[in-house]
């Protein structure tokens, strides 16, 4: 049932509940609404009186639900009403539904919601969609309505944090969407996203949601050594394994680039190589590096292209091969 609103002491229609008995015999259902039962009515019967409804087999009944706003003298605010329908022999033996009843003092009432967000993100994530919604649940129009996002520390956006929504008639709403980036250094753990709203009538609204920022380690890996076989005495020792010196290493690697690895996925990429020995043949090439070689299960030499790296485990973060 959608959120409803009313002024102090007003009776407000909250919606309908259908009880459907698909069994072979008549069942009786008990209704309750907890601590707010004295202000909730099912077919005009107060929920705190534990009303009982009989439903014949293979039939259904519809209960009209109304609620009474807070009594005069109390503060404006939102009450969450949970209605439970139960039968000890039914399957399931109970079912519940909830709705909000807002009490206001009259005039416009700005009801804020964050309708789109990610409950869990990771440091370094980008283009996270956030949508805020403002509904006028009062009994008069709201003019000059503005909505503002308040982002957690370390979050940023290229969009305007504040937008003008203008006029909101009674029952009308408007939405605003931005995309946010989470810095790699943003605080992890539970963070809060807020939206606020205000109108020319000095009516305000507030809503917030929690999101979990997960920590991720970003590592840079540099390839270090290769084993070569050369004829004659280019490096001495005939056919033995040799390590490239700095100059030879620069000639050996033909590309210096950063490979973006998608979290949680296995990927392959090509490293361009060149033989620094004009009269030698490279054999038994190996690649090594911090936090890198242990994740590589195969390295294939591709003729005239270089080396193709395969990994059966996800390579997380960024790897710079030079």
Image: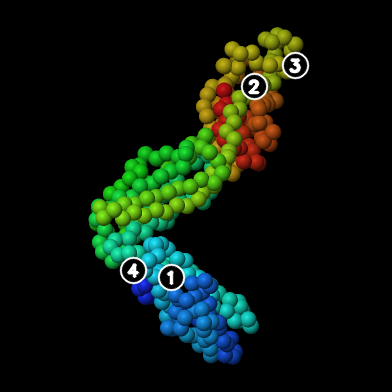
Mark 4 to mark 1 CA distance (whole Å): 19 Å
Q: Which residue is denoted by mark 4 in the rendering?
A: 7
Please state if 269 lies on the left or on the right of 166 as rendered. Answer: right
| Along the viewing direction, whichever of 50 and 56 lies nearer the viewer | 50
Q: Residues within 10 Å of mark 4 (few under 14, many from 20)?
A: many
Q: Which residue is denoted by mark 3 in the rendering?
A: 240
Residue at the spot 75% in from the left edge and 11% down from the top edge: 237
Mark 2 to mark 3 CA distance (whole Å): 18 Å
Task: Point out the tag, 4 or 1, that comes first from the N-terminus.
Answer: 1
Q: Which residue is denoted by mark 1 in the rendering?
A: 1
Task: Point out the tag, 2 or 3, that comes first from the N-terminus.
Answer: 2
Relative to 73, say whether 90 is above or below: below
Q: Position of residue 172 (x, y in %)?
A: 30, 62
- Say which mark, if any, is on residue 235: none
- Check the picture and name the quadrant holding the C terminus: top right
| Along the viewing direction, whichever of 267 and 217 lies nearer the viewer | 217
Looking at the rendered structure, the number of numbered marks drawn on it comes to 4
Residue at the spot 45% in from the left edge and 46% down from the top edge: 128
Mark 4 to mark 3 CA distance (whole Å): 90 Å
What secondary structure is found at the residue carrying circle 3? loop
């Amino acid at each position: 049932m959608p959120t409803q609103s009313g002024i102090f002491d007003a009776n407000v229609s909250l919606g309908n509940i259908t009880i459907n008995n698909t069994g072979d015999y008549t069942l009786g259902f008990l209704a309750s609404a907890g601590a707010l039962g004295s202000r909730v009515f099912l077919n005009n019967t107060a929920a705190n009186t534990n009303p009982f409804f009989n439903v014949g087999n293979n039939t259904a009944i519809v209960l009209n639900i109304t609620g009474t706003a807070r009594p005069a003298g109390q503060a404006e605010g939102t009450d969450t009403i949970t209605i439970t329908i139960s039968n000890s022999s039914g399957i399931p033996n109970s079912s519940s539904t909830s709705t909000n009843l807002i009490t206001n003092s009259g005039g416009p009432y700005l009801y804020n919601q964050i309708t789109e967000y990610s409950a869990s993100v990771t440091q370094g994530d980008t283009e996270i969609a956030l949508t805020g919604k403002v509904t006028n649940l009062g009994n008069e129009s709201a003019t000059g309505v503005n909505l503002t996002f308040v982002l957690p520390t370390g979050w940023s956006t290229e969009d305007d944090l504040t937008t003008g929504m203008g006029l909101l008639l009674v029952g009308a709403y408007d939405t605003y969407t931005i995309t946010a980036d989470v810095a790699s250094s943003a605080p992890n753990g539970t963070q809060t996203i807020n939206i606020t709203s205000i109108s020319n009538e000095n009516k305000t609204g507030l809503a917030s949601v929690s999101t979990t920022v997960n920590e991720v380690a970003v590592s840079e890996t540099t390839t270090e050594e290769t084993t070569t076989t050369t004829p004659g005495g280019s490096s001495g020792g005939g056919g033995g394994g040799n390590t490239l010196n700095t100059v030879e290493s620069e000639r050996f690697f033909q590309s210096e680039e950063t490979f973006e690895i998608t979290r949680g996925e296995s990927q392959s990429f090509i490293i361009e190589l060149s033989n620094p020995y004009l009269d030698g043949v490279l054999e038994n090439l190996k690649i090594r590096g911090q936090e890198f070689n242990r994740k590589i299960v195969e390295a294939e030499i591709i003729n005239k292209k270089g080396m193709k790296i395969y990994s059966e485990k996800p390579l997380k973060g960024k790897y710079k091969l030079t």
